[in-house]
Amino acid sequence: MASLAPDAEPVARRDLGTATSSRGQAVDPVFVRQKRKQVARACDECRACRIKCDSGRPCANCSRKSRVCSNGTRERPSALAIAEKKINDLESNIRQLRQELEHERAKTAQRKPLTPSSSSTSQESSGAAEDSCLAPKRAFNYGVSLRPPRSSNDSWFGPSCLYYFITRLAQPLGLMSQPSTSLEGLLTMPSAADTSKLVGEKGPHDGPEDTAQLVESMTLGGWNSMQEQYFIDRYWEGYHTAYMPIIDEAEFKAHHQSLWSASGGARKPSALVDIVVAVCMQLGDPTSNASNGEMNLTRTDGAMAGRRYYRRCQALLTYEMESPSLATLQCRLLSALYVCAGSFHNMMDACVALAVRTAYVLKLHLDPPESMSPKEKEKRRRLWWATYLLETKIATKLGRPFSIDDGHAMPQLPRDDMEAAALSGSLFAPIGPNETWLSFNRHHIALYKDVRQAHIAFFNTCATVSESQSIWDNAGTLEVCARTLIPHRKRLREWRDSVPSALRQKRRDGGVALSTDGTAILLEPFAPLWLQRQRLLLELAYHHLSINMLRPLVSFSSRPQIGGHAEALANDCASHAIAFTRIVHQVLTTEETLTGWHETFHWQWNATITLVGCLLAKHNWPSPDLPREARHAVDLAAVVCEEFAKTFAVARRAAKTIRELCIKIDALALQPDKVPRLESEAAAMEKTTNAAIAVPTSGEVVFDVGTSVTGACFNCHENPIIHNGPAPEQDLFDIVLSVDFWNDMDVWWPDSTMEM
């Protein structure tokens, strides 16, 4: 091959490309890759498509695809030139933005010159200040600061709180005046040493005493295992089934029994057992006052019963601060329920905050791993969602920010199927084909989740649209805020439709459950008490949360747009309050299902004040029947409070306050330019009820608590309301604000005689 002549090479290659068959027939030639002819410049279309082009014009590609074949008719910049141009443009934009930022900073510095003291602080945190000035923050300044009569400090409550609504309501009622100091001299303010006795500690002059000595000194003498068991047995059909199932019943009973058997004559201390006994004693005995219908206020008040157990529980919890357990969280949650019944708002808020932090420490905010047993996983999920529910309830009630971040992923909702009920430790019969006693808890949590999202969306909108004036000063602004609630109202209806029939409270005369149609409820005679309470509380919670969600749309300073969302939702708020009051009145006067249930009383007080506000609001009623029904519901609320007064004292004061408010409403009803004309229901109520609930004159009401209002800005009506009568207006304003406040610190002191 090396001696092959150059002119022979093409012949050899041609021979390789020719072949014949054995029969002498020609066959297809073998393909031999030829060297591609180089094209000086491809056509424009082939260059754009990045395909090979030939020297023909038009080229083969353009001819096959019927395209216009051109070469050199348009000049295309190279990729490098395009990249360089983009880089130059971006650098120019960056320089321009920097110049604008420096210009804005200079303008801000000229408007607010730094003082020598503040300049050093700003220089130390210049990086954070630069970032914060670029991100505008929402500012929502609504709220009210109140000072209870036995406190030397103010407490702030947000716009969703009932207290803020009361301060807005004070002006149409003619109660707003300068803070009264007439009662301050008659009230004994506790000193710092006395305040330290709140949890049973010694004062600074009583000598040292550590937590261990405190626990040993707090004897709960006189109680035996049978008496404690009486109250503990009530827990399982009370808070356990109708609030939050956070305790394994079988494990708790074994633990309680071991404390007595190992100690001999007295039970060993246990924080969990103490708080369970305390909350059960707080519910009282539904049959103890049935004979005379009265309560001996000198000996017991249901809201404060069991306080010694509560104090010892808090002392024992100090040992677990650094190393909490699931039992620690259970104690925190039940402690919050205990102080909530006594209206100790700040203590309740602090208990919930400790519960939230404890839940984070225990890693309950993450879904349990698959390696964990199904029983333990469900227990941890129920504990987390109980914390979430209670934190939602307290934050919306007080109008304060949430502690749990809704933006983070959370564990899945606890199961409520037959398997989960079997693993719960409690033996309750199924209530439906796919429902168990845990189904109430699941739907209860889902309800509060929807209301929480509505709360956040509404007040975020209020903070955005309101600048120098309040949302109630302008009908257009109020309408914008009302539209925010429309999708959340739809979600509530979807939740209502998802509630199974086994948990729906039946109605008479074909009425619809979870509605405001006004029909009476029908209690199933052979249903267990815990199931009856679940149905009632789920219905009442739906109405109560609807009231709180819609109440901010009740306006006293501007009339909402006719036919708008704000007006319609405000009327819906009144309908829910009427439905709530009728249900509670029927149950308390005929059954004992809600007897001693403190939370229902607070909900009733909330609904009553809302009804008073709806009667005095500036909006159009859809029909003349609705204001008459609202006025009648206020009279029913006084009867409800009288029933609750059999178990705790503050309800009796609430009943007197409601009657005094009825006098004000009837007086204002005679002024057609203020509120719609209403027909008083007092005469009808006197005919159908006993003399104990007759509306007294203003001089018969005795007020023993005063409250100072500070730090609030209100919008006055154009024409002030003048009330002609002897009613003590400022005292009435004080008592309205103080019904849901703690009323006596003495009941917490060790030497108090108010113990069950």
Image: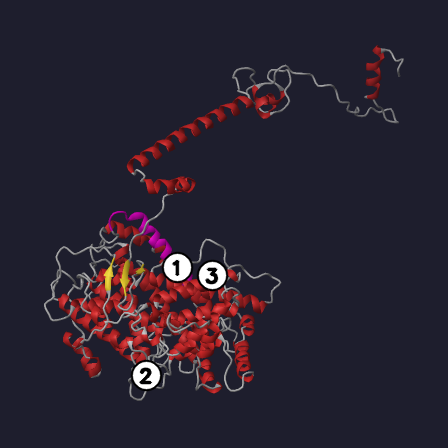
Instruction: Give the colouring mode of the picture.
Output: secondary structure
Label 1 crowd bin: few (<14), some (14–19), many (20+), radius 10 Å: many
Q: Which residues are magenta?
A: 447-469
Position above or below: 699 against 56: below
Left of 580 or right of it: where is 627?
left
x then y, percent, for residue 602? 32, 71
Disc 1 is placed on an element classified as helix
Say which of marks 1 and 3 sits in front: 3
- In the rendered structure, find residue 357 and report the number of the disc placed on it: 3
Asked where in the image residue 263 lies, by quadrant, the reply is bottom right
- Which residue matches tag 2? 299
Asked where in the image residue 630 lies, by quadrant, the reply is bottom left
Nearer the observer, 70 or 150: 150
Q: Earlier in the sequence, mark 1 or mark 3?
A: 3
In magenta stretch: residue 468: yes
User: What's the residue type where badge 1 is placed?
Assistant: Arg
- In the rendered structure, find residue 452 and report the number of the disc placed on it: 1
Nearer the observer, 509 or 572: 572
